[in-house]
Amino acid sequence: MRKIWIAIFFLLLFIPSVLAGEFWASKNSNKYHYPDCEWAQKIKSSNLIKFKSPEDAIKAGYIPCKVCKPPMASK
């Protein structure tokens, strides 16, 4: 039962940012991710950069993550 609550907590935590079209990147990398990507979860808060669109991330010099495969353009 505890695992279910933990899963629900994480879903509620990340769904708003995915629905809002938020993308995460690290100051120390050249990739941008969906917030729930395993690699995005490893970004230290001091290195975290958030983008509102894939275009913003690309303009800043980032490329899409090959694991979570975020879009190259907004839908």
Image: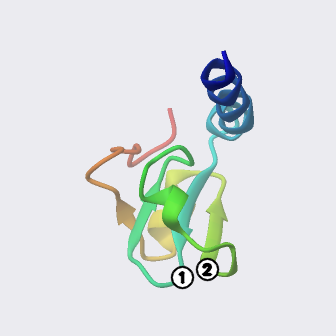
Coordinates of residue 38 in the picture (x, y in percent)? 43, 51
In what element is the residue under mark 1? loop
Residue positioned 51% across, 40% down in the render: 74
- Pick the residue in front: 2 or 62: 2
Residue 63 image position (x, y, % from top left): 35, 64
Q: Is residue 64 above or below residue 68?
A: below
Q: Nearer the viewer, residue 12 or 2?
A: 2
Q: Would residue 26 be found to the left or right of residue 66 on screen?
A: right
Report which residue position mark 2 lands on: 47
CB atoms of marks 1 and 2 within 8 Å? yes
- Measuring 70% from the left and 37% from the top, which residue is drawn there? 20
Dot 2 amino acid type: Asn
Tell me, for residue 60, which label it has, or none. none
Residue at x-position 42% and y-position 58%? 39
First in sequence: mark 1 or mark 2? 1
Outermost residue to the bottom:
28
Q: Amino acid at mark 1?
A: Lys
Q: Residues within 10 Å of mark 2 (few under 14, many from 20)?
A: few
Question: Which residue corresponds to mark 1?
Answer: 27
- The quadrant in which residue 62 appears is bottom left
Of the pair 11 and 51, the residue shown nearer to us: 11
Q: Position of residue 25 (x, y in %)?
A: 52, 67
| Relative to 20, 57 lies left or right | left
Q: Up-down: is 33 above or below 9?
A: below
Q: Quadrant of residue 69?
A: top left
Location of residue 27 (image quadrant): bottom right
Q: Disc 1 to disc 2, how far (Cα)? A: 5 Å
